Image: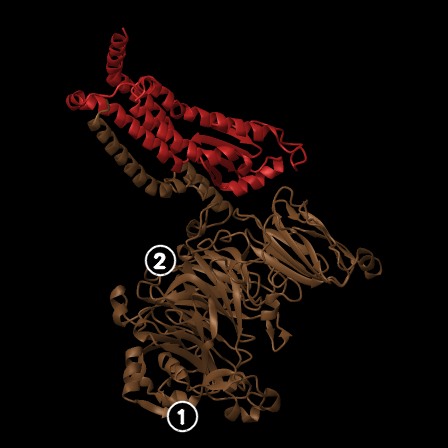
Chain colours: A brown, B red
Amino acid sequence: MKSDASSRRTSSLLLASIATAAVLTSVAPEAGAQESRRRRGGGQEAKPVELTPEQVGQLTKVANERKLNVDDLLAAAKTFMPSGRHDEYVLFASGGQSGQMFAIGVPSMRLLRSIAVFTPESWQGYGFSGPDDHVLKSLEINGKPVLWGDTHHPALSETNGDYDGQFLFIGDKANARLGVIDLRDWETKQIVKNPLTISDHGAAFVTPNTDYVIEGGQYATVLGYGYAPLEDYKKSYRGMVTMWKFDRTKGKIDIENSFALELPPYWQDLADAGKAASDGFFFINSFNVEMATGGIEKGNPPFEAGASKRDMDYLHIIDWKKAEAAFKGGKAKKINGFPVLMLDTSVAEGILYFAPEPKSPHGVDVTPNGQYMVVAGKLDPHVTVYSIEKIKAAIAAKKYSSTDDFGVPVLDFDAVKEAQVELGLGPLHTQFDDKGYAYTSLFLDSAVARWSLGGDYAKLHSEQPWKLVQKTSVQYNIGHLCAAEGDTVSPDGRFLISMSKWSVDRFLPTGPLLPQNFQLLDITQPGTTMPVIYDLPIGVGEPHYCQMIKADKLQTWKVYPEVGWNPATQRLDPNAPKPGQEGVTREGNKVLVKMVAVRSHFTPEHVEVNEGDEVTWRITAGETAQDATHGFCIGGYNINLSLEPGEFVECKFIADKPGTYPFYCTEFCSALHLEMAGYLHIKPKSQGAAAAGQDAPVATKAE
Amino acid sequence: MSSLLTSLVGPRVPAEELRTRRMRYLTPTLIFMVSRVLLLVSIFFPYWHMELEAPQYPNGLFLTAYVNHLGGDVREIDGLNHYIGMRPLGEAAAFERTASVWAIIAMFLLVEGAAFVHSRWAVLLALPAISFPLGFIGDLYYWMRTFGLNLNPDAPLSSSVKPFVPTVVGDGGIGQFKTFATLGVGYWMAVGCAALVIVGFFFHRRAYRPLFLQATAARRDRSA
């Protein structure tokens, strides 16, 4: 009865349908797994504005009431950020003696947050997890806690000479340390202490692919923390530059593969790595080639005079690829356990050359195409521009005007000089834009100078090459300046920050200690238009240098990738308590507290230990929502932790002061934030320990 | 083939008849096939969404129900629900979520079977697939009602938030949250499956009823 044809057809249909289903199901999970999310928030979309006469009237009225002119209104319009709209750039500024970093949004100039680096900071729980805190340990120098830093020059990591938004390095001038910050969670991951020198200045600068982080020195000392009287200055004192190898996959400095170069005891200053045409070199300024040793009280010329006597100092030109080869070839000598290429090696290997540079210069900055090095005169009203082609040619032809006292060849000034541009008094630092202009800070003139570059840059602008174009006054005493991505291979030419050291009358008086003034300049228009459009008081430490990165380059985590994440190792921590594992256990006098924090309670809430117990307290923040951060503090024990969503933190202390200690959440987390608390009981030895019995757990597992 | 089985599965189509009027018999089979595939594929698509809006969650919170799991901000929603004493969402419909994939495979096979059965009993085989969308909504309502009405009286906000029945489909609200619940692509696939099965039966009846009547008449003649 059964039809063969029908059954065959049906079975082939069945096969076809199963095949279709298989194909569909193999693609469907991808599509289905993506939970559709309707985007909301983040500010309203901008619509073109057309002011009605009535609105113009309102605006005029407000402007007149507040005594604003049209330039002020334009400045406000260029910088105002409606709520929820994000800035285009992030400025990472050093925090000077605060030992921190600041992140500031541009153009709104709003402080986004600080990043603790060399100074313990309680909000971030940085250095407040008890006496064994790993931050405190990493801040020790020769066994001494050194709980502050003088952060000077930040350096964003680069790929092919452009910021890649992954890491941030910062130097501590006071203690010759380098901090490494991971820009996924904006936290300091490593502190490296230079084993050769107590203090430095020329850190941090990176090579174009962040192979090395350059740390230049400053005040010559006896390398390796040694002692020698000043009479032996020339014989025993030395300068140095350290090449810290960076391991990008580990996100840490690879100390084993780092090395330094011994330099004459001139006071080395700022550095910059060559790029493109000058890749493979880096450059360091110096002053005090006089080797003055001061001693005003002994009738000697003070440093300020002695170190400024000669008309020329030396631009250090270092072939770091040759230096790396010499280091890898085993030509370094160990000082304080750290490999150093000695001066005679550097001279013999053709690693180090000098070029004369006018009197006590400050910054040396490489143009985006790498062809020119701009040295700012400080005590000379010019910037001096050197050409890498001419430098290479002079080295090849051995065009030396002399050798210095240490045998280092000094290249002939006229053979390597490209141009000198007179800008004004006190030129310090130079940055660049995309229109063939350079910008130099003029400290004594309190101004930003815009000047035209020559060579390949001449076709980008309509000015005479190598000429001053405009000076905009800033308030006051500008040190560094920073243009948007202005020290990379592709500057953006949008905004410029004047890091004005003095604010004097710019803000309401704040006692004798005044904030510094970050001023925003709009450098979008060519020619002589370059107005100041915002003043931001920086009332925390004294920033030195900053870098401005396009915000969309940052791949910042919104919360930690997984619950139980250890930011110190940047991975899930096997010790992170999971929900259900909470409790208190004891082994002898060692007590382990496993805690989970989630809105709005800690589990456990009762913790009881005995006087003298060694307490290890592990907390997992069980949150996954953005900004659902908790804190955890124990009063009287100097403990405060920041428990960011997903973060695992551990604190340790000796319970040596008996009593009743409430612990609570220090970050306002929820409506029941005040209720997010518990009690730590530390039983006095006299009654507690004996009665409870040393071996018995003193608090049972919660729930 | 026993006569009982014959009367259950209905008459077979003679080969000659099948050759001459192929589309007539192929149509219901094809429609059933598409409906089966729709149902199977729906496993991978969300059946139900709920979006929760509150001032401190500018991007909203999302809950997505598939037949076999919950997706979206379950952890965050559970965290918030503990304030009002609602049980964790993972405890809801545990059996249904485990059984659903097998149930759908069973329905797939049953609808496939319906294509072979050329009698009215075919409807019985397809009944689960036809009623599945209704069953899903009913079950969802049951669990939301059960969870909403059985809040832990010792929860932190039990004095301010009283037991309630969350809105299953449409706009609702609780505390500072506004909720928007909608049915998902997967659900509409299941509805599509049910609708196609019904349409399929129209063609099924058109194709096989004459044969069925013929066979019944023949049987009656034989027995007479």
Q: Amino acid at mark 2?
A: Thr
Circle 2 crowding by C-alpha within 10 Å: few under 14, some 14–19, many from 20 = some
Q: Is residue B54 above or below residue B113?
A: below
Q: Going by the picture, which residue comes out furthest to the top?
A: B224
Quarter occupied by residue B113: top left
In the rendered image, which residue does mark 1 sit on?
A407
In the rendered image, which residue does mark 2 sit on?
A524
Q: Is residue A434 left or right of residue A404?
A: left
Q: Going by the picture, which residue comes out furthest to the right?
A: A686
Give the quarter of the figure containing the N terminus of chain A.
Answer: top left
Q: Amino acid at mark 1?
A: Gly
Position of residue A638 measured from the top left corner of the image (x, y, whole percent): 69, 61
Q: Secondary structure at mark 1?
A: loop
Of mark 1 and mark 2, the one earlier in the sequence is 1
Image label count: 2
Give the quarter of the figure containing the C terminus of chain A.
Answer: top right
Quarter occupied by residue A248: bottom left
Position of residue A691 measured from the top left corner of the image (x, y, whole percent): 83, 56
Q: Is residue A677 left or right of residue A316?
A: right
Query: In front here: B221 or A66?
Result: B221
Q: Residue at point 35% right, 60% down?
A: A492
Query: In front here: B168 or A109?
Result: B168
